[in-house]
Amino acid sequence: MVNSQTSSSHGKLIAAVLAAVLVVVLALLSAFVWPGWAMNREAEQPGANQPQEAAAPTKPSIKAEPLPGDASELLKAMPDSVLNFARTKAETSTSWSSSSPLEQYTLTYSTGAKGKKLTLLVAQWAESDKAKSEYVNLTGSLEGKELAGGDVKVSGATTGSYTLHAEGKEASKATAVWQNDTVVFQVSGDKDSVQRFYQKFPL
C-alpha cells in the first residue's frame, strides 16, 4: 500500500513538472515565434539603433579672405573665423550712416556650403550712448518673434544688450543684434547658423 501511494505521488510530481515545462515552452513560442514581440521589442523602442547626429564642425574648411593693408583697428578686430565660418568679404558700408558712426563695415562669413552665408554689419560710435541709441532703433524695427535676449557682459560688467529675432514669418531665417560699449553688430542669415555664430563671436 505504501509503495502504491509513493508511485502515485511520484507520478503526480512528474506530471506537474511536465506541465510546468510545457507552459514555459508555450510561453517561449508565444514570445519568439508567433508574434515575434520579444525579438522585435528592441527595434520598436524609441531611439533604438538610431544613428547619432554628427556634431557641428568647429573649424572652417575654407580660408579667410585677407583684410586690406589699410584696415582700421575696428576692422582688424573682426575674427578671421567663428567656428566653421570663415570671413570671405569685408568692405565699407553705408547702412547706418544716418546715425553718423565713426566707421562701419559689411562682412560676409561662410562655411563654403550653399545657403550657409552670414552677413555681418558692424559700426562704431564716439560714445556708448550713441551706440545704444542705434541698437534701440535697430531692434525696434525687427518684426519677427524674439528667440533670445539679455545683457552683454565683459569681465562681469554689463557693456550692452543683445537680442535674437526670427526674420518676420520666415522661421528658417534670423537676425541677431548686440551692442558692446561703442560698437554695434548685426548678423543675419540661416537661423541655426546665426544662433551658433553670435554666441561664439568674440566681441
Image: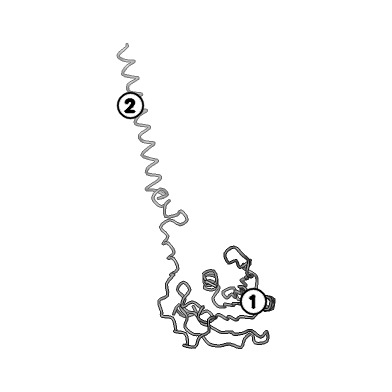
Determine whether, in the image, residue 73 is placed left or right of residue 44.
right
Q: Is residue 106 above or below residue 9?
A: below
Crowding at dot 1, Cα within 10 Å, few <14 / some 14-19 / many 20+, comes out as few
Q: Is residue 121 above or below residue 202?
A: below
Which residue corresponds to the image point at 47% horizontal and 85% vertical from the top-left? 67
Residue, disc 1: 168
Amino acid carrying label 2: it is: Ile
On-image quarter of the N terminus: top left
Q: Which disc number belongs to residue 14? A: 2
Between residues 61 and 6, which one lies in front from this camera angle?
61
Which residue corresponds to the image point at 42% horizontal and 55% vertical from the top-left? 43
Q: Nearer the viewer, mark 1 or mark 2?
A: 1
Which residue corresponds to the image point at 47% horizontal and 55% vertical from the top-left? 46
On-image quarter of the C terminus: bottom right
Quarter occupied by residue 128: bottom right
Amino acid carrying label 1: it is: Gly
Between residues 143 and 94, which one lies in front from this camera angle?
94
